[in-house]
Image: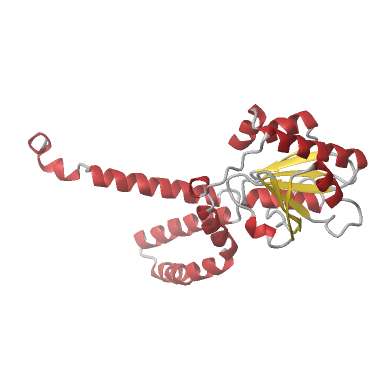
Amino acid sequence: MTELFGNYAVLLPGLKDLVQILIVAAALYYVLRLLARTRAVPMLFGLLVLAGIYLGARLLHLDLIRYLLEKVFEYGAIAALIVFQPELRGALARLGQTRMLRLDDPVQGDEIVDEIVEAVERLQRAKVGAIIAIEQELGLEEYAATGTRIEARVSADILVSIFAPYGPLHDGAVLISGPTIIAAGVILPLTQFPVADRTLGTRHRAALGLSEETDALVIVVSEESAQVSLAHRGRLERNVDLARLHEVLAGGPARRAALRG
């Protein structure tokens, strides 16, 4: 092999090099996925623009601009760590909560799905507002700490009673992990992005906010219109009927399409 390629043999990657390249590529892909649909994306594009200007300043020997940009880069990294501390904390939490590192299976059973859909139907019929977040691969323990611990098996009766008007937990969200309601009255983060539809209330904005930070499936029942919405991966689907909701929760084609989206 060395004789065949001569002086260029040193440039051929070995097995160790290929492994390192794959690891770095996977890490970059993971970081880009974490940055997707967060406020860090515009900053990333801004940094690329500044890097281009800095390169141009070096090539054209524009010493003043180069010096100023070097100072920006020097102290900007520290500022970015402070400004984007929530995103960095969330990214580290997600790394430790991926399915590879978790022993539990978040997939919903048919009985649990039936109970959730029945609860949504009853809430919709009574025009009672509700927000139900169903854990997927990423854990929701961080958000559960803001509410009241329940630790009860998923039941339509319990879900309906939690969202009963004037109840102490009515305005918060319910978190479901597998067959268990882990918390109620939970405070969820509002979406970081502008919402074009001004008719969306706090529940919808909170559902979008949680779906931007995690991969949870978030169900919203509107108190005003009794309309059911489903948030996932930063996207909100309005006017979801019960058949589609059941299919999404049960893991049918609709859910796979939602996950791809």
Left or right: 92, with 113 as reference point? left
Q: Is residue 53 above or below residue 207?
A: below
In x, y percent, where is residue 39? Answer: 61, 56
Quadrant of the rendering where the N terminus is positioned:
top left
Residue at (91% x, 57% y) in the render: 166
Asked if 13 appears above or below 92 in the picture, the reply is above
Indicate whether 136 appears above or below 91: above
**Residue 118: image location, x then y, percent:** 81, 36
Number of marks: 0
- Foreground: 118 or 57? 118
Relative to 161, residue 254 above or below: above
Q: On the image, which quarter does residue 251 sit in?
A: top right
Residues 190 and 218: in front is 218
* Residue 123 visible to the viewer: yes
In depth, the one of 241 and 81 nearer the eye is: 241
Relative placement, left or right, of 13 versus 188 is left
* Residue located at (79% from left, 51% from top): 203
Q: Residue at x 14, y 41 (%)?
A: 9
